[in-house]
């Protein structure tokens, strides 16, 4: 089962956070399996998923930590924020209370990750159009004010799910190239695995790969 | 010759005797092989329990009862015996007589109600009794509501839905399920479900230390892969193996849990990890280790509950309540100056 030494050149660590029932696990499942799991069991503590994607010509392995949404589990899940390169913060577009709690999720994220962590806001369940409880514009404004990337998505139809995970990776990659994310920092959430010994270090090849994304 | 009593007529079906749909890739052949020998054991145990129960229902604690419990309580007696050996009967006597209904009529925070409601459709969706409108969902709601009202310090914690749900499937009685849930959370387990989950964090650390002393190589391996123990075993402890292990195995674990309390939870986990020790040691990266680890509970080793429990009970005699108390105390005092959420 083991692949050749490294079939990818980077590992990015992600966490997915947000209130219980907003669809974090379904988003992860849709992203890794390309399927909607309507009978998804709720998450106790933390679950884990991976997928390799290609961004700007680089194979990147995403290590994704899916956390339990219930408040009390934060005692445990908080310890998983450390060293996340990307944080997907999810609310449910059909339940305002899950949107109202975003500021507390954001505070946790800011306090527990580092300044280079990319935070992506996802308004999930966009397929339930007639149950909408949070306007797109309102969430967009919240995202802009806080410097977050943002989409509305649906784990059910798959709409915008790929985008959210991939855009986050692109942004992280950009930050590596800008030098804003220091690969050598212990808790950057990024590991570099040269795919062919002796070849790549990032600086060697960055000009060619400059990402316009 | 195979003995089949009517309860097991469902065994060729895609639904088990507690109403759970069997997974698509369920290995009927191996299951049948196991079942054909297990049924003989069950019939045998049933006869013995019949005698024991006839002798007088007092079910004195002692070596005989302990041995009987370890070998499994017949499902027809489970509700009654669990109530007795767990101390739930005793608890009930000392409380107001209609506590369950009193609690049902109390007022709860809307947050708590909302949390319970969110988890109802997510509780055993693969069980025929938990299909919406099938009744069990509303009963489960009431059990969780009553317990949340009874213990405001805990309220509702995710995971309790599985425990209460399985209690309901076994006892088929709301009120008995309430009392069993209450005795488990209030008396039998440490503080697992309250808002800080302190007892849970401590027990995860206790488990890690037990692993360290019993399987030092594996402990080091987990450490070198940088895998937090909470990722591996938290669900085991929060759900008491429900929603993790096959149903019959969970019930056999609970038989012991109600009698001897916490040690069984540790024994089970250690036995399982030990059985897969070599395979786990062979996983040289984070992802493959976790993949193997997550698949362990589905192995035939665990499904064959009788053999599994035999191993669990014979291999880990050193894990006693006294030992656990000692380790918990140690950890508490070590970590006093730290935030417990740094654990483990
Ligand atoms: N219609 C619709 N339903 C969804 C969508 N995503 C998730 N759901 C449903 O929402 C419920 C909760 O989804 P989960 O993915 O388990 O939620 P979670 O955020 O992981 O919840 P916790 O693990 O408790 O924190 C499930 O019953 C899903 O079927 C979506 O995009 N559209
Ligand atoms: Mg989840």
Image: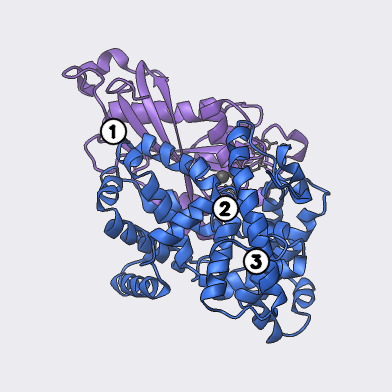
Chain colours: A purple, B blue
Residue sitting at x 45%, y 68%: B199
Q: How many marks?
A: 3
Q: Is residue A2 above or below residue A79?
A: above
Disc 1: which residue? A191
Instruction: Answer few, some or many: residues within 10 Å of disc 1's Cα (few below 14, many 20 plus, some between 14 and 19).
Output: some
**Which structural element holds mark 3?**
helix
Q: Nearer the viewer, residue B27 or B247?
A: B27
Residue B280 picture location, percent across and down: 34, 41
Q: Quadrant of residue B320?
A: bottom left
Q: Is residue B287 left or right of residue A162?
A: left
Q: Chain of mark 1?
A: A
Residues B289 and B9: in front is: B9
Q: Are marks 3 and 1 on the same chain?
A: no
The chain containing the residue under callout 2 comes to B
Of residues A129 and B91, which is closer to you in this image? B91
Structural distance between the alpha carbons of marks 3 and 1: 60 Å
The tag on residue A46 is: none
Q: Which mark is residue B48?
A: 3
Mark 1 element type: strand
Q: Chain of mark 3?
A: B
Q: Kindly identify which numbered label has been placed on residue B249.
A: 2
Where's ligand 1: which quadrant?
Answer: top right
At horizontal 34% and vertical 31% (from top left) the residue drawn is A11
Q: Residues within 10 Å of mark 2 (few under 14, many from 20)?
A: many
């Amino acid at each position: 089962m083991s692949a050749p030494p490294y079939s990818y050149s980077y590992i990015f660590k992600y966490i997915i956070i947000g209130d219980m029932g907003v669809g974090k696990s379904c988003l992860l499942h849709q992203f890794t399996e390309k399927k909607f799991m309507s009978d998804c069991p709720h998450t106790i503590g933390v679950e884990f998923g991976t997928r390799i994607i290609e961004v700007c010509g680089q194979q990147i392995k995403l290590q994704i930590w899916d956390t339990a949404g219930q408040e009390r589990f934060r005692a445990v899940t908080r310890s998983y924020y450390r060293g996340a390169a990307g944080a997907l913060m999810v609310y449910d577009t059909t339940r305002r209370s899950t949107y109202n709690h975003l500021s507390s999720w954001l505070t946790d994220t800011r306090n527990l990750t580092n300044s280079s962590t990319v935070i992506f806001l996802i308004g999930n369940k966009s397929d339930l159009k007639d149950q909408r409880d949070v306007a797109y514009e309102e969430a967009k404004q919240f995202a802009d004010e806080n410097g977050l990337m943002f989409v509305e998505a649906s784990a059910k139809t798959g709409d915008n799910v790929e985008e959210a995970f991939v855009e986050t990776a692109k942004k992280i990659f950009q930050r590596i190239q800008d030098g804003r994310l220091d690969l050598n920092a212990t808790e950057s959430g990024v590991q570099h695995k040269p795919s062919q010994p002796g070849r790549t270090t990032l600086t060697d090849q960055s000009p060619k790969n400059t990402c316009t994304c | 010759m195979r003995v089949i009593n009517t309860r097991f007529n469902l065994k060729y079906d895609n639904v088990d005797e507690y109403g759970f749909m069997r997974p698509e890739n369920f290995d009927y052949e191996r299951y049948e092989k196991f079942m054909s020998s297990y049924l003989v054991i069950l019939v045998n145990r049933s006869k013995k329990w019949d005698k024991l129960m006839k002798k007088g229902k007092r079910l004195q604690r002692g070596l005989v009862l302990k041995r009987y419990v370890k070998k499994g309580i017949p499902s027809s007696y489970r509700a009654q015996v669990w109530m007795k050996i767990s101390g739930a009967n005793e608890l009930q006597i000392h409380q107001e007589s209609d506590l369950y209904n009193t609690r049902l009529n109390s007022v709860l925070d809307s947050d708590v109600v909302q949390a319970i409601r969110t988890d109802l459709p997510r509780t055993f969706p693969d069980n025929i009794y938990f299909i919406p409108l099938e009744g069990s969902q509303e009963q489960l709601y009431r059990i969780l509501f009553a317990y949340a009202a009874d213990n405001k310090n805990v309220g509702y914690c995710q995971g309790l839905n599985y425990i209460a749900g399985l209690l309901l499937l076994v006892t088929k009685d709301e009120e008995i399920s309430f009392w069993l849930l209450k005795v488990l959370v209030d008396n039998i387990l440490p503080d697992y479900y309250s808002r800080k989950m302190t007892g849970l964090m401590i027990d995860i650390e206790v488990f890690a230390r037990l692993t360290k002393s019993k399987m030092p190589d594996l402990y080091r391996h987990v450490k070198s892969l940088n895998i937090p123990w909470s990722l591996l075993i938290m669900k085991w402890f929060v759900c008491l193996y429900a929603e993790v292990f096959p149903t019959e195995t969970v019930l056999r674990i609970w038989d012991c849990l109600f009698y001897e309390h916490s040690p069984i939870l540790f024994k089970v986990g250690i036995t399982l990890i030990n059985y897969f020790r070599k395979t786990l040691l062979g996983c040289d990266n984070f992802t493959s280790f976790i993949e193997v680890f997550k698949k362990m509970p589905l192995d035939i080793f665990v499904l064959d509950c009788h053999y599994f429990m035999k191993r669990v009970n014979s291999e880990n005699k050193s894990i006693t309540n006294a030992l656990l108390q000692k380790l918990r105390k140690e950890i508490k005092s070590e970590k006093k100056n730290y935030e417990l959420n740094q654990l483990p």
